[in-house]
Amino acid sequence: MKKSTMLGLLVLVIRRDLVLAMRRRADVLTTLIFFVMVVSLFPMGVGPEMDMLRKMAAGVLWVAALLASMLSLGRLFSADYLDGTLEQMMLAPQSLSMLVLGKMAAHWMSSGLPLVLMAPVLGLQFDMSVRALGVLIVSLLLGTPILSMVGAIGAALTLGLRGGGVLLSLLVLPLCIPVLIFGTGAVEAVSSGLSIASHLSLLGALLVLALVFTPWVTAQALRISME
Amino acid sequence: MAINWFKYSSPTTFYGLAGKMIPWFAIPAVILFAIGLYMGFFVAPVDAQQGEFYRIMFIHVPTSILSMFFYLIMAGYAALGLIFNTRLSAMMASAIAPTGALFTLISLWTGALWGKPMWGTWWIWDARMTSQLILLFLYLGFIALHASIDEPRRADRAAALLAIVGSVNVPIIYFSVKWWNTLHQGSTIKFSGTSMQITMQHTLLAMTLACWLYAIAVVLARVRSIILERERKTDWISELPEVKL
Amino acid sequence: MLEVSNLACSRGDHRLFSGLNFHLHLGQIMQVQGVNGSGKTSLLRTLCGFLMPDEGEIVWRGERIRELGEDYHDEILYLGHLNAIKDELSALENLRISAGLSGIELEEKEAVTALRRMGLRGREMLPTKVLSQGQRRRVALARLLVSDAKLWILDEPLSALDVGAVALIQELIAEHLAQQGMVIFTTHQPLHVAGMEMRTLSLS
């Protein structure tokens, strides 16, 4: 028996959550299917006119990604909360923020990353140009981790509550609006000729801010919820 | 001032103090409302560009400014409650929330009333109106979270954390909404381009003060009823004349 | 080592207990007694640091646990009503992860030995959802074998266990106390530790 390091603990948490996600594949797949369905609803709702759909594409894909992320966030802490593993994590002799960061990373890898990979396929349904698709992928790659991280705060605050996923979405969606604006803005900059880089760098800045602050805030939220 | 602030941080003492303070805010509020509305609707001159309709701004502007201001105050009380563990701070935050949300609603509604004659539509997606809408969501989120948690201590602390996170986000949200608006060349609701007439400025001031005093009076009244509800099992409550009935 | 002074706790509006004082030294075991709802679980959870007391102090090695934070966590082991095991993982994986979270890297061989001592021979690799209640409790209790914590905080450790397992747990506790460990627990079933004077704390 020997003592583990901080990094070792991070890797342990990420591997654990990924293994659990793999063994409950249904959860991961349902999020992805929801994403595809929501995107497909829009043309059915507004009509199949390609010009209009092309203009809406970035917004539709981003909103759908946002909603799919909200749905998957409920899973972040609730299983661990219900079987008691969460309270054991809170008694770990390592920084809770580090453990939370590990859980956020694993959550993104099992929920956000599939969305990023699926998005270009759906973008083709909206006749997006290759260049626009490229920027879309980058914007989602930068933005979905932010959604996971900010959403984790909501998940931690609503732990075990009846309102569940809807309440979580109500709390977190307003906070995610900047990500939505810069994410879609980047894609629209492709066709409008404005600076893509400025949108993406703003997203990058938000990502860095989220990385620095959200694990600690989420740890505090967990402590509040576990009292 | 050499007041022992911590004495007033106990709900017991604050209950009495608040009760005494309410009329001092409520009566001036009513007077200022009367003055402000009279000035706004009868005295202030017709605007060169916007005609008579602009008068709605005398309600729209104060409520907009105050709705944002109250959110920060609410977050401030929330932070105090979290750091110092004082029950009263959390109660004050809960008391401010509904008033803040109401002001946001009034701001949105009067904005719509202003927009219709100005732009022909009931809603305009400009930066300020959109930010107000998001602010309404933030207020409602706070109220909903607090209402969803049965255990009062957890409810206070969770909602407090949410309020603080929200207030930190407000500048980011506002910046991104402005960005979004300028990108899409949206329209803006502006006051008359030329400098505002003195009477208009005075009216705005009167109305803003009136709304502020009104809000303080209402919040004090609300916090008293929250105190009554939370402390209902303690002895001093049952000694109160209003409860003894 | 552990000193509790003037502790008061409430749940919601309801005051559970107040003015609680006690201390626990190395090699000692203490049972917390009280009727249902008297706050036994809340006391144990307050000792873990989950609940904040209304009044009073909990001091470990001369420092307040609130200030010690993770250093205090390093020295305690908490077993509550929930097993803290994942259904989808095997007993072996669960034990190694639990150990990992408390800062110990457990070799597979060590983990298997521990599980075998807990009577789970042949079941180490099965996902714990196919195990019985009692077997799952044994997986949870296997942590006692691999932990290096000084203070064991156990909330009804014997629930769902059969006679053989109860004897085993009593043996483990005796070994822990002999190595200068400390135990504070609650139980609805009788728990005897050979040759040990049991201190009691009554909350009613």
Image (spheres, coloured by chain):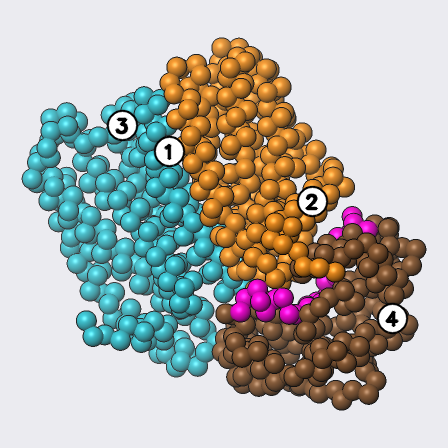
Q: Nearer the viewer, mark 3 or mark 2?
A: 2
- Residue C167 percent across, percent down from the top left: 87, 76
Q: Which residues are magenta?
A: C68-91
Q: Chain of mark 1?
A: B
- Residue B135 rendering spot, x and y as whole percentages: 37, 42
**Residue identifier under label 4:** C165
Check disc 1 and report the residue beneath it.
B176
Q: CA distance from mark 1 to mark 2?
A: 36 Å
The amino acid type of the residue labelled 2 equals Arg
Say which colour chain B has.
Answer: cyan
Number of labels in the image equals 4
Q: Amino acid at mark 4?
A: Ala
Contact? badges 3 and 4 (CB < 8 Å): no
Q: Which chain identifier belongs to the orange chain?
A: A
Pointer 4 indicates a residue of which chain? C
Q: Measured along the vertical axis of the image, is residue B79 above or below residue B177?
A: below
User: Looking at the figure, which quarter contains the C terminus of chain B?
Assistant: bottom left
Which residue is at 70% across, 39% downward? A27
Q: Which shade is chain C?
A: brown
Left or right: A111, with B56 as reference point = right
Find disc 2 in the rendering and name its residue.
A15
**Secondary structure beneath label 2:** helix
Q: Is residue B43 magenta?
A: no
Question: Circle 3 is placed at which residue position?
Answer: B188
Picture layout, residue B115 above or below residue C83: above
